[in-house]
Amino acid sequence: MSWSPGIAANLERLRKQAKDILWALRLSAAGDFGGVLAGSEMGSTQSGEPVDHMVEAGSRRDSSVMSAALAHPIGPNTVQDWLDAAPPPDGSKLELIMGYFSVVPPPTGQHQFIGYWLARIIDDALRGAGRIDLHVVPAVGVKVSTAWRTAVIADVVVLNTRPIGSSFTPDQVELVAEVWSPGNKRDERNTKMAAYAGAGIRYFWTVDLNEPTITAYQLRHGEYVPRTTLVAGTAGTIMAAPIPVTVDPADLRP
């Protein structure tokens, strides 16, 4: 069926609004990121329309999640403000969660070591498979959602575009890997996972800094489903990736 240009444009606008709303619901369900989002003002979509009454909750849990999402106001800072902001002088990472700036402490040497070697292992697999169209880059910005004013700095990403610039959109990201340190609280971890899932990034890996353990997830119906968990001392092949990657988490130890 073909639509007139006007109807097609409206359908596309509604589709994008629905995606933004579902993303916000997942983010709200994941946690309030330390309570910085608490408030009573209502958020709005990129078009400026209020988000209430646009998604019909299908269960009591959906209804409670909807209420929680609408209870969080969108903060005053935009993705452009985040892009324009000077980086913290002490090496901390400045991230943006639903319009609020969040400062993440500087990573430790162990954290950076793991990120570096993980990037190398993924890059070796890509080159071995002849995937010169994909590029592994550590510590770059991902503009998760402009409408919901969220942007984060991922530890390792696989891009499907040339790595030129300091930040990238979700459609340019094939895989995100985050190294979880003891300082990463549960709410922070859940919030980032919900943000990446809501943005439609297909593959997501986590590395536990203390073990280390790698858990690889794949996006299914808007949520991440664990596909593989590898512990140190056991080499395995991760299929939740643009290409299979064989790794032993023990190789990530300093």
Image: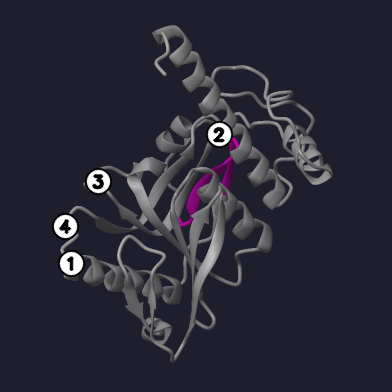
Placement of the C terminus among the 4 image quadrants: bottom left
Label 2 – label 1 distance at C-alpha: 34 Å
Frontmost residue, 168 versus 198: 198
From the image, state whether disc 3 or disc 2 is nearer to you. 2
The single residue placed furthest to the bottom in the displayed view is 233
Compared with residue 92, is residue 149 higher up or lower down, i.e. above or below? Answer: above
The single residue placed furthest to the right in the displayed view is 60
Q: Earlier in the sequence, mark 3 or mark 2?
A: 2
Q: Earlier in the sequence, mark 2 or mark 1?
A: 2
Q: Which residue is mark 1?
A: 127
The residue type indicated by label 1 comes to Arg
Circles 4 and 1, Cβ within 8 Å, touching? The answer is: yes
The residue type indicated by label 2 comes to Lys
Does dot 1 land on a helix, a strand or a loop?
helix
Frontmost residue, 47 versus 11: 11
Start and end of the magenta stretch? 88-102
Q: Is residue 178 left or right of residue 70?
A: left
The residue type indicated by label 3 comes to Thr
Q: Which residue is mark 4?
A: 132
Does dot 2 land on a helix, a strand or a loop?
helix
Q: Within 10 Å of the Cα at label 4, are there few (<14), some (14-19), or many (20+) other Cα atoms?
A: few
Q: Is residue 104 visible?
A: yes
Question: What percent of the width, then of the height, locates residue 203?
Answer: 43, 58
Question: What percent of the width, then of the height, locates residue 178?
Answer: 47, 63
Disc ID at residue 19? 2
The residue type indicated by label 4 comes to Ile
Q: Which residue is mark 3?
A: 161
